[in-house]
C-alpha cells in the first residue's frame, strides 16, 4: 500500500505555474502528486476538461542537496554549483483519482512534444529527438549551476561511441523553479538510431510556449 500522504504545513501556497489542458483527457476530476520518500506530495489538480492547475506547496529541507545531485564533472574537482549544501527537491508527477493517492491513474509530463515523451518513457532505449522536457524543482536558497560537462557514451551498437556534452547554465531562485532540459543536437548510430549529443540545462522564467502537458496511463 502506498505510504500515507505527506502532510505539509502550507505556509503559503504558490500560484499556479501552469494552467493548460491535457490533450485527450477523459479521466474526470483528478489530483496531481509527486513521488516523495516521505509519501506522495500533492501539488495540484486536473479538472474534468483536462485543465491542469498547480499549487506548489512550501516544502521542508531534505537530505538531497544541489551538490549531490550535480557532482563536479571538472578535472579539478571544483563544484559546479555555488551552494553545494542547498536543499534540492525534484518532482516526478503522477495523477490519482482520489486525494489520498491510493488510485493512481498514470504519470504526467511537461514536454515539448509527444516524441520527447516517447523517448523519455523508453528510458533512453528509443530514438532520441530534439526538444525539451521540464521538471519542477525546489531549491532552499538562490544558487547557480554552471559548467560544460563531457562524457563518453557507448551506444551498444558494436564499438560505436561518442562524446556527449551537457551545458549547465541554471540560475535557481529560492523556492520553486521550472528546470528545462533541452536536447539541442543529435547523433546517429550505425543503425540510424538517434542519440542526444548535446543537452542544455537552464531554468525557465515562465512556462515556454512549446511546453505541453501529456498524460501516460498506467500499463495494464
Image (cartoon, grey):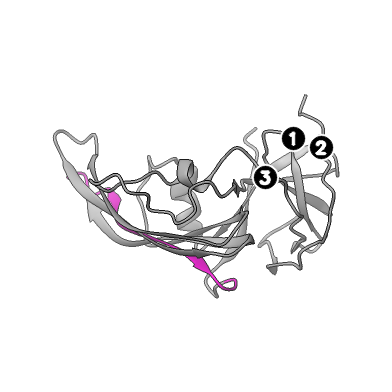
In the image, which disc is placed on residue 61? Answer: 3
Query: Where is residue 60 shown, x and y percent of the image?
Result: 72, 46
Q: Which SS class for mark 2?
A: loop
**Magenta highlight on residue 84:** no
Q: Which residue is mark 2?
A: 5
Q: Between marks 3 and 2, how big is the CA–CA gap?
A: 17 Å
N-terminal label among 3 and 1: 1
**Does the residue at mark 2 contact the one at mark 1 (Cβ under 8 Å)?**
yes
Q: Residue at x 18, y 47 (%)?
A: 162
Quadrant that contains the N terminus: top right
**Does the residue at mark 3 contact the one at mark 1 (Cβ under 8 Å)?**
no
Camera-nearest residue between 33 and 82: 82
Q: Which residues are magenta?
A: 190-207
Q: Compared with residue 142, is residue 38 higher up or lower down, i.e. above or below?
A: above
Q: Between marks 3 and 1, how big is the CA–CA gap?
A: 15 Å
Badge 2: residue crowd in 10 Å (few <14, some 14–19, many ≥20): some
Camera-nearest residue between 38 and 66: 66
Q: Residue at x 58, y 65 (%)?
A: 173
Q: Which residue is mark 1?
A: 39
Amino acid at each position: 500500500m502506498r505510504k500515507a500522504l505527506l502532510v505539509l504545513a502550507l505556509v503559503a501556497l504558490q500560484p499556479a505555474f501552469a494552467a493548460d489542458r491535457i490533450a485527450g483527457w477523459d479521466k474526470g476530476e483528478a489530483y496531481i502528486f509527486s513521488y516523495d520518500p516521505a509519501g506522495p506530495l500533492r501539488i495540484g489538480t486536473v479538472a474534468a476538461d483536462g485543465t491542469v492547475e498547480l499549487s506548489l506547496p512550501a516544502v521542508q529541507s531534505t537530505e538531497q542537496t544541489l551538490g549531490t545531485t550535480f557532482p563536479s564533472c571538472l578535472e579539478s574537482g571544483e563544484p559546479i554549483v555555488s551552494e553545494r549544501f542547498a536543499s534540492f527537491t525534484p518532482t516526478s508527477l503522477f495523477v490519482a483519482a482520489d486525494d489520498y493517492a491510493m488510485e493512481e491513474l498514470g504519470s504526467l509530463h511537461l514536454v515539448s512534444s509527444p516524441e520527447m515523451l516517447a523517448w523519455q518513457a523508453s528510458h533512453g532505449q528509443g530514438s532520441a529527438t530534439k526538444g525539451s522536457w521540464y521538471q519542477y524543482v525546489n531549491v532552499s536558497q538562490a544558487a547557480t549551476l554552471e559548467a560544460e560537462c563531457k562524457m563518453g557514451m557507448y551506444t551498444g551498437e558494436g564499438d560505436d561511441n561518442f562524446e556527449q556534452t551537457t551545458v549547465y547554465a541554471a540560475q535557481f531562485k529560492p523556492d520553486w523553479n521550472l528546470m528545462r532540459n533541452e536536447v539541442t543536437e543529435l547523433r546517429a548510430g550505425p543503425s540510424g538510431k538517434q542519440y542526444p549529443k548535446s543537452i542544455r540545462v537552464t531554468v525557465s522564467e515562465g512556462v515556454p510556449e512549446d511546453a505541453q502537458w501529456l498524460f501516460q496511463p498506467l500499463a495494464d
